Amino acid sequence: MRAMGAHRMCSEQGLRPGETGASALIHDLREALAAAGDPARAEQERAYLKSTMPMHGVGVPKTRKIAQSFAAGYPDLWREAATWEAALRELWDGATHREERNAALAIVRSKHSAPHAARMESLALYEHFLRTGQWWDLVDETSHAVGLVVRAHPAAAARMRAWAVDPDLWVRRSSIICQLQHKADTDLALLTSVIEANIDDGEFFIRKAIGWALRDYARTDGDWVRAFVADHPGLSPLSCREALKHL
């Protein structure tokens, strides 16, 4: 196995013929994730997540640690927004195991992505992750990145309102939960809008998202959440229970 990650600084001399920095990173990440895997855990996690994609059984915390360590070995990939996005798309779209998609999201969350993650233009990448991830674990982590854009750019609220009525339930879910942990910075008009757009939706993952978003904001302003629930009798029992859980 060739030297990897933080121990292998990417350079023209260090690449195989025809290999790019992104493909080198992906090669090294795949090797490391496979080596760190636990087959028994992989089957348990795959059953829990109902994943059709194979898994190594690494676990999210360890996957994040591996991904962020390896990303440090390829600094050229993260300097420009174009190469940053291209590398993440290649890692995500070419994933053979679910951990590779978790690794892409870990890099988005890392310091290497700081110059690019909150760009308005990055919403296109995150929307791609949502539409192709199509399950709660990947969607919820992607929504953290969406929230970075929403917090940094008031103009992103219009996009979230459009997402709130999108035919794809995972895009709708992201519009609802993208402001988690924004606390006093929460755009309440936006939160109200995206919830009201989905208040009649019978889908479990939407009702749960509504309750989660309200419960999270209740830590900042419980009175606002109580009033919101009282003013919206159409909220599902699940959403109401989750919203008022700690009040």
Image (spheres, helix red, strand yellow):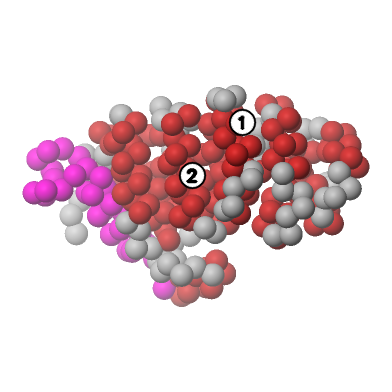
Point 66% across, 32% down: residue: 182
Residue 84 visible at all: yes
- Please, what secondary structure does the residue beneath circle 1 have? helix
| Residue 33 placement (x, y as % from top left) | 35, 59
Give 6 or 51, whichever is nearer the viewer: 51
Quarter of the C terminus within the rendering: top right
Disc 2: which residue: 127
Q: Which residue is mark 1?
A: 157
200 is higher (above) or lower (below) than 109: below
Secondary structure state at the residue bearing disc 2:
helix
User: In the rendering, which numbered label is found on residue 205?
Assistant: none
Magenta highlight range: 10-39
Locate residue 176, reporting x and y percent: 66, 43
Residue at 63%, 37% (x, y): give it.
161
Query: Is residue 14 covered in magenta?
Result: yes
In this rendering, position of residue 122 left or right of residue 226: left
Other residues around mark 2 within 10 Å, as few (<14) / some (14–19) / many (≥20): some
Tell me which secondary structure the magenta stretch mostly adopts.
helix
Q: Position of residue 124 (x, y in %)?
A: 44, 39
Q: Is residue 95 rendered to the left or right of residue 14?
A: right
- Residue located at (89% from left, 40% from top): 231
Instruction: Tell me whether the residue at label 2 lies in contact with that at label 1, contact meaning CB atoms closer than 8 angstroms.
Output: no
